[in-house]
Amino acid sequence: MNGIIIIDKEKGVTSRDVVNIASKKLNTKKIGHTGTLDPIATGVLVLCIGKATKISELITSYDKTYLATIKLGIETNTLDITGETIKEREAPLLTEKKISEVLDSFLGVTEQEVPSYSAVKIKGKKLYEYARNNIEIELPKRKIEVYNIKLIDYKNNLITFQVKVSKGTYIRSLIKDICLKLKTIGTMSDLRRLTQGDFLIEQAIKIEELDDKTKLISINEALKEIQFEEVFGEKEAAIKNGKIMEKDFSGDLIKYLNQSGEVIAIYKTYLKDKTKIKPYKTF
């Protein structure tokens, strides 16, 4: 069993919970997800099964689209509604125009502070471990990119917006920064992942619908954006043996398919010599 399944994660369970349930349903330990969703969040959770676990880092790097809701007038230690309230104040009366202007200001490349309640490691410990023990530590910053962002709804001190972002973006931190620019406080009350790369929420199934008859997305289809070449004979044998080869294509990656249409390897440009390519993933 090798391929991809898109799960519509429900609220209240962890991404690891979903993997564990899928592992039992499919009777395999070779399974993993490609980007954590917090328990409060729902939506697209891409699971890689069997040989497809080798491409999990590629899928993790894909852009993601979210539908997020901000509850104004409250701030929590976790930056979402599940956390402990640390500040409260009356929410200001905003206009949709003002909110849209602030949202638009985040378009492009910006710098974001990683939230204290996250799994990012500093000196061998996860940030949430420091936070839970009330140990202050300088939070790391990272560059992110917001490709598009738009206001969906604003009523009853709730702002709902849709945003497409690069890998590593924390929507909780983005919401904190949005509230700062709105000169108020707020916290994330809801989050739904709509897309991850070309994987859409419309393709997703509930975890309870998953069984051993569920059709998987093939490795080849999952990586359809990567150019390919069908090989056989000596070249196929060389690729299977991991031979470094001359580069004869543009771009950085290429996937090689056997005559049955199965991906046997992904090669990437050799760092020491841009005219050569070497194995990146073999199957």
Image (tube, helix red, strand yellow):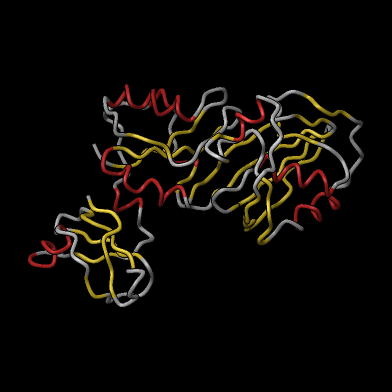
Q: Which of 58 and 219 is in front in this view?
A: 58
Percent across and percent down for residue 273 are 32, 75
What's the residue at 38%, 45% (across, down)?
Answer: 56
Percent across and percent down for residue 211 are 31, 26
Percent across and percent down for residue 96 are 84, 48
Q: Nearer the viewer, residue 51 or 133?
A: 133
Q: Quadrant of residue 157?
A: top right
What's the residue at 48%, 33% (across, down)?
Answer: 8
Side of 126 where 258 appears, left or right: left
Q: Quadrant of residue 209?
A: top left
Q: The N terminus appears in which quarter of the rendering?
A: top left
Side of 57 where 156 appears, left or right: right
Q: In this view, does 278 lie above or below 82?
A: below
What's the residue at 51%, 37% (across, down)?
Answer: 36
Q: Quadrant of residue 154?
A: top right
What's the residue at 47%, 37% (across, down)?
Answer: 45
Q: In this view, does 35 lie above or below 262?
A: above
Q: Which residue extends farthest front?
A: 123
Side of 243 where 201 appears, left or right: right
Say how many tags the image has: 0
Percent across and percent down for residue 175 are 73, 42
Q: In this view, does 21 lie above or below 176?
A: above
Q: Which residue extends farthest left?
A: 233
